[in-house]
Amino acid sequence: MRTSFLPFCRPSISEEDIAAVGDVLRSGWITTGPKVAELESLIARRTGAAEAIAATSGTALMQLAIEAMGIGPGDEVVGPSLTWVSTPNVVELRGATNVFVDVDPDTLLVGADAIDAAITP
């Protein structure tokens, strides 16, 4: 059992961020308004993609991504053991198998060596 503290952190939210959210809420548009189109355009430009889409949650985006990659029954998906429940759930929903690896205690990230060791030959 872990006895040391796992250092999660508080989000960094500025007054400007709060004001921007207020502007969107007052606009009457929440999920399909002009700010969504602006965000999608910005993401496409920054990533060099022809298009980008926003979704209502990270879970929805993971579902779209895993489907687009063609992951399904017989596939294994290596992922972190330190994650939100949606991460393994989207894998299970596609009929694939989760393979969990521990995160590095210093970086809280999964290292390439851990991924290599977890891949089934």
Image: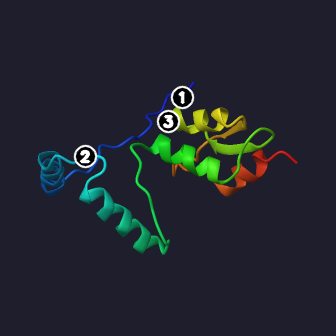
* Badge 2 element: loop
Disc 1 versus disc 3: nearer the observer: 3
* Badge 3 element: loop
Of the two numbered discs 1 and 3 on the same chain, state the one appearing first in sequence: 1
Q: Quadrant of the N terminus?
A: top right
* Badge 1 element: loop
Residue 30, labelled with which disc?
Answer: 2
Nearer-the-camera pick, 8 or 73: 73
Residue 84, labelled with which disc?
Answer: 3
The residue at the point 39 percent across, 40 percent down is 8
Is residue 110 visible in the rendered image? The answer is: no
- Image location of residue 80, percent across then percent down: 60, 42
Colour mode of the rendering: rainbow
Residue 2, labelled with which disc?
Answer: 1
Distance Cα–Cα, label 2 vs label 3: 25 Å
The 10 Å Cα crowd at callout 1, few under 14, some 14 to 19, many 20 or more, is: few
Q: Give, as a three-letter code, the residue at label 3.
A: Trp
Q: Is 112 placed left or right of 20 in the picture?
A: right
Above or below 20: residue 90:
above
Of the two numbered discs 1 and 2 on the same chain, state the one appearing first in sequence: 1
Q: Is 31 placed left or right of 106 in the picture?
A: left
The 10 Å Cα crowd at callout 3, few under 14, some 14 to 19, many 20 or more, is: few
The residue at the point 63 percent across, 47 percent down is 67
The answer to whether mark 2 and mark 3 are in CB contact below 8 A is no
The residue at the point 36 percent across, 68 percent down is 41
Q: Give, as a three-letter code, the residue at label 1.
A: Arg
Is residue 54 visible in the rendered image? The answer is: yes
Q: Give, as a three-letter code, the residue at label 2.
A: Ile
The residue at the point 41 percent across, 48 percent down is 55
Location of residue 118 (image quadrant) = top right
- Image location of residue 46, percent across then percent down: 41, 72
Nearer-the-camera pick, 93 or 11: 93
